[in-house]
Amino acid sequence: MKTSTQREIWIVAALALIGLVVLPLLNGAVPVDSPFHLTTFQMGVFGKYLCYAVLALGVNLLWGQTGILSLGQCLFFALGGYALGMHLMLLIGKLGQYQADIPDFMVFLEFPKRYPDTGGLPPHWIPFRSLAFAMAAVVVVPALVSAAFGWLAFRSRIKGVYFSILSQALTYAATLLFFRNDFTFGGNNGLTDFKFILGQDINLPSTKRALYIASGVLLLLTYAFCRWLTTTKFGLIQRAIRDSENRVLFSGYATAHFKLFVFVVAAIIAALGGALYVPQVGIINPSEMGTEKSLEAVVWCAVGGRGTIFGPILGAVGVNALKSYATHSFAEQWPYFLGILFILVTLFLPEGLAGLPARLKGLRRKPAPATPESSTSVTPKP
């Protein structure tokens, strides 16, 4: 086990070197006409994959390590995106079609009549003019929502499939709220057309490159945190709760407190990924918090390897790369590909892609069945 962990760490270190050093150099230092040049668009796509990998690590922390199957993690992913997106929207008011101090959709929806004292800006939007407040909201808002929901659910001993259904219901209710135009978050169009971040043009190659590197660093830190957590006593209790929560209860541990803490941490991880996802993709709308998105994240973990640390990263990047290819070449058949992939992995590779090397090694070491010629028999005496 120790050898396999060390091997995984070396693999992650090599991939981090390639991802954080080589790829940005291919984009910024290699001439555009070179076949080795990495375009800014490709950097944005890779950055999106890294943000999804951060989300997958949060899902795995709940499902793979603690046995809590939540179908609402994309709600927290979207809340982090909305928190930063609100700040980015307030930077482009004068550049919009109406050239007002507020975003265009607020002018179109006649917000100045609803909020005359603030020039049409809803009061809860005002603090988001500050980037520091927006970044604090990226962490605090999902943490509060997850803490309130988790406390009610775990205090009531809701677990298993009932918790999954309840988390799905929470996500569905939040999606309906955000789809309403009078909820002040842009309705079904969401927030889009971002132009600046930290005073820099968001579409410049250097800015896209910086956002990609920030996503890679966040993923690396999240991986290190999850890896460290598995080595602690807390991580041991996590796995014990996953395997037999009743035994942990009989041992004197308040499992509800442990599960609540993990639920809040996973929500914050998802929100941080969502915050970096928004400026790279350029849009955030209620569809990002839909229940089908959370189901996709569960598939990433299952395909990559539930319960491992590196597996969810592999699953998120691999499945989304396949999705990008399949939606372009087989747009209508893509959902079937995803379903077949999930079924095949569940039936034939329950450990996921991360467990494939160990399975292949086990097949090589499997002893050959004895042949009649090689077997010896004893003839009884007459």
Image (cartoon, rainbow, N blue to C red):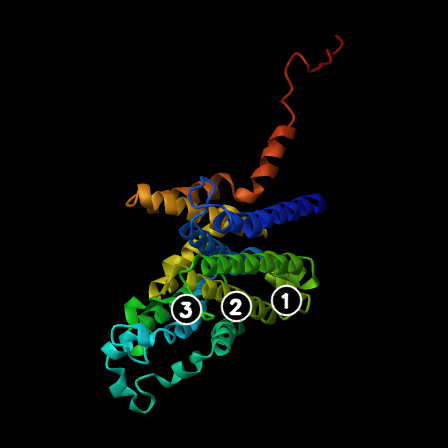
Residue 69 visible somewhere in the drawing: no
Q: For the residue carrying disc 3, how many other residues have a C-alpha within 10 Å: few (<14), some (14-19), or many (20+)?
A: some
- Mark 3 or mark 1: whose residue is earlier in sequence: 3
What label sits on residue 317 in the rendered view? none
Task: Tell which of 136 and 243 is nearer to you.
Answer: 136
| Label 1: which secondary element | helix
Residue type at numbered disc 3? Phe
The alpha-carbon separation of the residues under discs 3 and 1 comes to 51 Å
Asked if the residue under mark 2 is in contact with the one under mark 1, i.e. CB atoms within 8 Å, the reply is no
Foreground disc of the pair 2, 3: 3
The quadrant in which residue 248 appears is bottom right
What label sits on residue 249 in the rendered view? 1
Residue matched to label 3: 196
Q: Residue at x 52, y 51 (%)?
A: 24
Residue 288 visible somewhere in the drawing: yes
Name the side, left or right, on which 243 lies relative to 153.
Answer: right
Task: Tell which of 252 and 297 is nearer to you.
Answer: 297
Residue matched to label 2: 268
The x and y percentages for residue 283 are 36, 64
The alpha-carbon separation of the residues under discs 1 and 2 comes to 27 Å
- Mark 2 or mark 3: whose residue is earlier in sequence: 3
Name the side, left or right, on which 193 lies relative to 277.
Answer: left
The quadrant in which residue 247 appears is bottom right
Q: Outermost residue, top direction?
A: 382
Asked if the residue under mark 1 is in contact with the one under mark 3, i.e. CB atoms within 8 Å, the reply is no
Foreground disc of the pair 1, 2: 2
